[in-house]
């Protein structure tokens, strides 16, 4: 067995660890969980809800393959379904 030194993101984004300290430092600079970047994940306006996704092809057993999907959205109306944002103008730090 070989021991390997690895680095994980300081911001807790659950990114897989990297073996390069330089590459992890580069990741941390652009990480959505770094408050300096004013991104959705650290904003007080990021909200979560669930939505039922109905499967029309349930094989004769209605409701059997329906599921709940978690949806994240911005409470002030800036849509983020497609991608998260950095340097948002309405960003406020989450408490």
Image: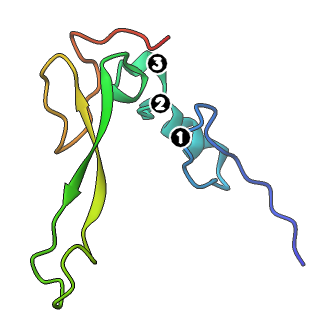
> Picture coordinates of residue 5 (x, y %)?
80, 55
Per the image, the residue denoted by label 3 is 35
Q: In the drawing, what numbered circle is on residue 13?
A: 1
- In the figure, 29 relative to 70: above or below? above
Task: Tell me which corner region of the image, top left, top right, bottom left or bottom right, holds residue 31.
Answer: top left
Kindly identify which residue carries mark 2.
Answer: 33
Residue at 35 percent across and 8 percent down: it is: 92
Callout 3–callout 2 Cβ contact below 8 Å: yes
Residue in the image at 18% along x and 42% along y: 81
Q: Of the residues under marks 3 and 1, which one precedes in the sequence?
A: 1
Q: Is residue 1 left or right of residue 12?
A: right
What quarter of the picture does the N terminus occupy?
A: bottom right
The total number of labels drawn is 3
Viewer-closest of 78 and 15: 78
Neighbours of disc 1 within 10 Å: few (<14), some (14-19), many (20+): some
Q: Position of residue 11 (x, y in %)?
A: 58, 31
Residue 43 vertical position relative to residue 51 in the rendered view, above or below = above
Residue 15 lies, in percent from the top left, at: 54, 49
The residue positioned 30% from the left and 12% from the top of the image is 91
């Amino acid at each position: 067995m070989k021991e390997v030194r690895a680095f994980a993101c300081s911001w807790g984004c659950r990114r897989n660890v990297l073996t390069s300290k330089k590459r992890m430092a580069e990741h941390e600079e652009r990480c959505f969980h770094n408050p300096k970047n004013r991104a959705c994940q650290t904003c007080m306006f990021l909200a979560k809800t669930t939505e039922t996704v109905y499967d029309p092809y349930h094989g004769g057993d209605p409701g059997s393959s329906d599921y709940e999907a978690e949806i994240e959205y911005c409470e002030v109306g800036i849509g983020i379904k497609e991608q998260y944002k950095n340097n948002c103008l309405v960003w406020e730090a989450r408490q």
